[in-house]
Image (cartoon, helix red, strand yellow):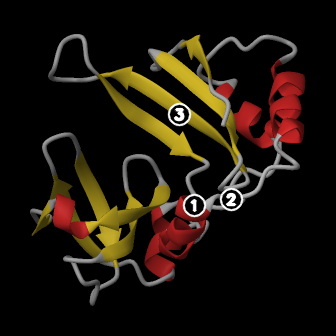
Amino acid sequence: MSRYVFSGKNVASSVALGWDRPLTTFFVQVMQPHPRIDGEELTFIWRGTAPGELPTAASAIAIAAEYADLPADIGAMLETDRLKTLGTFDGPAQEDAKPFIQTSPPSIRSEAEAREAGYTRAVVADSAHHTLELLIEPEADLDSIFCAFDRNANEMLHLHGWNFTIEPEDP
């Protein structure tokens, strides 16, 4: 795995991107200052968490470039990192973990698309670190892992329901 961290711009405090060989994906994490805890950050964007989600360095750079000034050679650096891992294979722990890795959630980028796809139940999911305004499927099992549409970030998520208190959204 490789990881490069850059100072953020606009709403971002820092941006990390790199190559994750076991997931065969590039990844991007955009952090921003925590709204309530001084000196802490929270994840604003985290892409490349599912196998093959960001298959090219360019796909990761396209996301990160809005939030950080990236060096001109970052694409070559990331591609070199990927190429260095071509002869590497999963160890026993990685092989054992692969069945538990979720595939990417559906590619839905607007509330209208989410509602059309059946994500019609509006809820608020709260944890110690995050409060999310979500649309979920009406029959979603809230004590399991389920897909949800994040109404603030306009993206689909896999949510581990047991990590959140989930309440109906106020009318």
SS label for mark 2: loop
In x, y percent, where is residue 126? 15, 52
Distance, label 3 to label 1, CA atoms, is: 22 Å
In x, y percent, where is residue 141? 24, 84
Quick one: label 3, few (<14), some, or many (20+) residues within 10 Å?
Answer: many
Q: Amino acid at mark 3?
A: Gln
Left or right? Give the position of 25 relative to 44.
Answer: right
Mark 2 near mark 1, Cβ–Cβ under 8 Å?
A: yes
SS label for mark 3: strand
Left or right? Give the position of 15 relative to 20.
Answer: left
Q: Quadrant of the C terminus?
A: bottom left
Residue found at the far front of this picture: 92
In x, y percent, where is residue 69? 68, 11
Q: Amino acid at mark 2?
A: Asp
> Disc 1 designates what residue?
94
SS label for mark 1: helix
User: For residue 121, what is the image quadrant?
Assistant: bottom left
In x, y percent, where is residue 110? 52, 60
Residue found at the far bottom of this picture: 139
Q: Amino acid at mark 1?
A: Gln
> Disc 3 designates what residue?
29
